[in-house]
Image (cartoon, coloured by chain):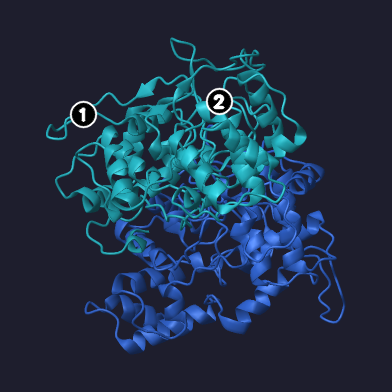
Chain colours: A blue, B cyan
Amino acid sequence: MSSVFWHTLFGASTGFDLSQISELLNIAKNKGLKAIPTGSELSKIQASRLSTDTKMSKDQIELGKMLYFDPRLSGNKELSCNSCHNLSLGATSQVRKENNPALLNAPTLYNVVFNNIMHYNGDITDTRSNNPGKKDTTLSALSKAILASFTSKDELNNTTKGMMKSLDDIKNYKYLFNRAYGSDVKVTPALVADTIASFVATLTTPSRFDDFLHGNLKALSQDELEGLVLFIKQGCISCHTGVNLGGTMQPFGVLKPYKFASLGGFKGDAHGNVKVPTLRNITLSEPYFHNGGYKELHKAIDEMARIQIGINLSSRETKLIADFLSSLDGYIKPVRLPLLPSSYHDIDEKSSIDDLR
Amino acid sequence: MSSVFWHTLFGASTGFDLSQISELLNIAKNKGLKAIPTGSELSKIQASRLSTDTKMSKDQIELGKMLYFDPRLSGNKELSCNSCHNLSLGATSQVRKENNPALLNAPTLYNVVFNNIMHYNGDITDTRSNNPGKKDTTLSALSKAILASFTSKDELNNTTKGMMKSLDDIKNYKYLFNRAYGSDVKVTPALVADTIASFVATLTTPSRFDDFLHGNLKALSQDELEGLVLFIKQGCISCHTGVNLGGTMQPFGVLKPYKFASLGGFKGDAHGNVKVPTLRNITLSEPYFHNGGYKELHKAIDEMARIQIGINLSSRETKLIADFLSSLDGYIKPVRLPLLPSSYHDIDEKSSIDDLR
């Protein structure tokens, strides 16, 4: 990266010209920023998040969506995955956790398919063998995290047995599993988690920034391009990189202490590292930090610059970085609210889901 | 109604013929059963549930849907109307309230537009003047009940002020109200309630039984017809009548005491009458009774026959009545999950809702 280049960019009062934008694009890619993949590349990643016994069929995904929205599988039968990872609200809950510090701010599930490490402390990773020829039914990190959320007392607060009992009580789920996996399928907790994972894996949100990474030099505004320059130049990109501009374990509170470090269940891994949250759709996932301590994005940007890279941003710099982050607001595919199967009807063979009600 | 007719029906081992079905249809209508109206008749009822300042425009209904799904308007910012009146689960919560007897089993909101009395104790009714020429901005029973649910400690547990503050904090709601009602609109708690009511008023679920009432003599199976005969003959129809097969205030525990009468917040009006729940979509709204004390529909039918009309149904009779009730399972219109406005973007004029994110 040439210092002449940075100088040119900031000196350019008439804005970036196409050759500068093209150079910036190359730098961004060389620094590790990646577009949300499409087509077979996306399918390959999605498949890698499921066990080898499952597939991303339409019936499986639709069933996964039902399970995602079904509160009857939780301990008190009132909470579903969607209660905290609310697809109407950026797949997060937007609840400040200051009054309940044991809980952690629910991370967005949009684009979580691109993560291979789960939870702030990174306690869930993919431990499967990487041998394509070998059948390995161990759960992926994503499926393990989903299963863990059913039994965590701070989340769905059920037991694996309770979850399976509830499923079993709702007669038509049996039919839906058969439809998705064949009549000889054995419904196990792992299969339930994998089925939900197949739906969650579809929650990808390509944005204007992805258009830019794919080579559309006019996808970003001049302010957003300036914000990207700052994002790279100031070093935000060291941790916020890859497809999700986050997702790896990194040191936290590098230059100044993290003011909420002692609040709630916040802790890092054995090396003190914590998982870097994605910046995709960040404007939708307020409040910020593990306890939701900051409501405004600009304050979160300032605080991160201060404690992680030791600089005080000017208000213009903060605004430009926020502008760049807004270009990560993705296209959210419409979701049709599922009609959940009832336990009244005892139907074995039907062609339409609506008939199962 | 001719006793010869009933005799003929039950003696007919070969099933009902068309002339018998036609006679049964006439009896059902004469006894007060009504189909869900369509077209201008439906529009007229929907409009009567809103104050004269509101209208059922597409923008108003879409905004009402957002408010229905937005947990940020509740006291703890975690509950929305949809949490308890879950549109994935028959617009109810399917939670047994035995562990929390202060709460009442959430009634379904499907077809609630046909009710003019709200709550078990009927404490909310429509008190508006019935003068079409006179402007009356008093709230309808439906809007009053919606507003009450925001401030009830057992429901959304907010204050009117807190609800308005939350709305005000989410910048783009202002734009959405302007879009729905014009730029000079004053957003009041009453308008919020009316806007939600306009969405709730669309939640109607016409069923095969409505086809029957509209004159399709082949809409019901032989067992369902037999169930309808019993439903009329045994007297269930005395209380479960009208469009919603319920909705009026009636005595309860007429011939035998109601076993859950002392549990939780259950009480009647000054005359000891309680509101009759609708039987529409009853197979989706388990568990039954005010505290959700009965899980199975057939047990609820048996209990109602015992305490209200003093008879013990045979298992075949119970099954036939349940079959008839299943014919009230309606067509549920697909709902696209709303994307709720964020408080980050400050946008005044936009043409697409998706741009508001």
Q: Secondary structure at mark 2?
A: loop
Residue A46 shown left or right of residue B280 in the figure: right
Q: Tell me which residue sits at (81%, 76%) in the image.
A: A130
- Which circle, 1 or 2, is nearer the viewer? 1
Residue at x-position 61% and y-position 45%: B225
Q: Residues within 10 Å of mark 2 (few under 14, many from 20)?
A: many
The amino acid at mark 1 is Asn
Residue at the extreme left of the image, as rendered: B133
In this rendering, the answer to whether A242 lies above or below B282 is below
* Residue lying at the far front of the rendered structure: B4
Residue A164 position, x and y percent, is 79, 48
A231 w.r.t. B343: above or below: below
Residue, disc 1: B130
Chain holding disc 1: B
**Foreground of the two, A25 or B69:** B69
x and y percent of residue A349 in the render? 73, 62
- State the residue in front, B298 or B52: B298
Kind of residue indicated by mark 2: Leu
Q: Is residue A297 left or right of residue B55?
A: right
- Disc 1, SS: loop
Q: Residue at x 33, y 36 (%)?
A: B193
Lateral position of residue A122 relative to residue B171, left or right: right
